[in-house]
């Protein structure tokens, strides 16, 4: 194997694939990125057995071959050298990288034991999604999913495909986020899929790195392997699908409210930051919202016996009943930080029922936060 390519392109795509390489894999070969050279292209592949990423770049191929190389160390070296031509040659079992003033040799492992990554060629995609809509959905939903594997179904994002509409839903049991998006062309079929949140976060990163304009993301289902494949330009991300039943979330979404607050997101977040100075020392990061409709004000307060107490007040357009309700400051901060609009709506009914966040003039999003005991 021998080829040459540009440092900037090589670095960009090597960084994308190497992100899924595990820091402590059970198999040494999973530390590595796989290289294949053929027909004027350099194909790079990495996997942690749950997520696989394959991409290609144009290269000057002098001789073809396949090998695997330590991903993290190679990426760090390529990122550190100047933007110039990079010459690479497989010399025995050594992967030799050379530029004008820098060189390195990396030990390799033959490709025979490298896991196979699913591919699609001439298959028709299940659907095409606008890249901006997809990134928005992931950003508004992924943070609400569980970060541990105690309940694997909660560490995934539910994707409900229904004709021209897709619902993305995430929950960890304390909160729930749902974002709906409209497709320009109906899906080939209706499906309900549970995708690991890590895979969706990697997908969002890939889109932000390489997509410009209104390019569409192709989505394929690989039925015989229970996997999903997203094609983003010249990058394919493959992920396993999670087996199991996602909670029946629709029944917990309130159908009405007794109090509605139209608020400025930044002002809410600023008051939250002030109150969190005390709230973060309280068990569960508990704070109290005291909503006064006559004064159009929301008072946020926290108290800790051995630290002190504080409060912050901000205004809004408030209608309905006065109410006092407690939440985790961390959960409130999370949802406010992941919204990209300033005019938001907060709705609630009683101190024991979920608080609801919406975006003004946007029916596609809803976020529920479970309250704490007063």
Image: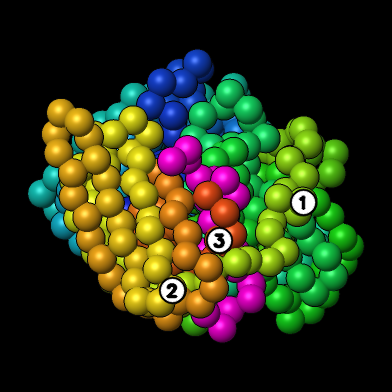
Front residue of 159 and 369? 369
Calculate the distance from the C-alpha at mark 3 to the C-alpha at mark 1.
16 Å
Q: CA distance from mark 3 to mark 2?
A: 13 Å
The residue tagged with tag 3: helix, strand or loop? strand
Judging by the rendered image, the residue that carries numbered circle 1 is 251
Residue on which the image places disc 3: 348
User: Can you tell which of label 3 and label 2 is closer to the viewer?
Assistant: 2
Separation of marks 2 and 1 at Cα, in angstroms: 28 Å
Classify mark 1: helix, strand or loop: helix
Q: In the rendering, which numbered label is found on residue 293?
A: 2
Q: Which residues are magenta?
A: 352-374
As drawn, is 51 to the left or to the right of 77?
Answer: right
Residue 62 location in percent, x, y?
Answer: 44, 52
Q: Is residue 262 above or below residue 336?
A: below
State the residue at coordinates (14%, 39%): 308
Choose between 69 and 221: the one closer to the eye.
Answer: 221
Instruction: Report the residue that reaches farthest toward the left.
Output: 101
Q: Quadrant of the N terminus?
A: top left
Res 247 → quadrant: top right
């Amino acid at each position: 194997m021998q080829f040459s390519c540009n440092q900037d392109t090589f670095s960009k795509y090597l960084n994308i694939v190497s992100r899924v390489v595990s820091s402590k894999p059970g198999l040494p070969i999973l530390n590595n990125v796989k290289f294949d050279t053929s027909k004027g292209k350099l194909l790079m592949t990495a996997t942690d057995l749950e997520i696989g990423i394959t991409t290609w770049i144009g290269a000057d191929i002098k001789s073809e071959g396949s090998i695997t190389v330590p991903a993290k160390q190679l990426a760090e070296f390529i990122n550190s050298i100047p933007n110039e031509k990079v010459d690479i040659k497989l010399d025995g079992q050594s992967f030799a990288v050379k530029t004008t003033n820098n060189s390195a040799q990396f030990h390799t492992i033959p490709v025979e034991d490298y896991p196979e990554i699913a591919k699609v060629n001439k298959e028709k995609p299940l659907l095409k999604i606008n890249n901006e809509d997809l990134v928005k959905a992931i950003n508004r939903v992924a943070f609400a999913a569980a970060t541990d594997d105690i309940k694997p179904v909660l560490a995934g994002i539910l994707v409900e495909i229904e004709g021209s509409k897709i619902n993305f839903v995430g929950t960890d049991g304390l909160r729930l986020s749902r974002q709906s998006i409209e497709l320009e062309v109906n899906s080939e079929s209706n499906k309900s899929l549970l995708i690991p949140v890590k895979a969706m976060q990697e997908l969002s990163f890939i889109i932000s790195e390489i997509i410009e304009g209104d390019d569409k993301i192709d989505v394929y289902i690989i039925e015989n392997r229970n996997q999903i494949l997203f094609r983003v330009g010249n990058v394919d991300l493959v992920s396993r699908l999670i087996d199991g039943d996602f909670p029946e979330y629709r029944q917990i979404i309130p159908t009405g409210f007794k109090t509605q607050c139209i608020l400025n997101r930044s002002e809410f977040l600023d008051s939250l930051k002030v109150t969190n100075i005390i709230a973060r020392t309280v068990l569960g990061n508990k704070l109290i919202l005291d909503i006064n409709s006559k004064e159009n004000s929301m008072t946020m307060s926290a108290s800790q016996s051995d630290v002190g107490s504080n409060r912050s007040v901000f205004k809004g357009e408030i209608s309905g009943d006065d109410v006092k309700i407690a939440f985790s400051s961390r959960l409130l901060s999370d949802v406010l930080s992941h919204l990209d609009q300033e005019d938001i709506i907060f709705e609630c009914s009683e101190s024991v029922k979920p608080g609801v966040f919406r975006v003004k003039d946007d029916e596609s999003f809803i976020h529920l936060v479970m309250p704490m005991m007063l």
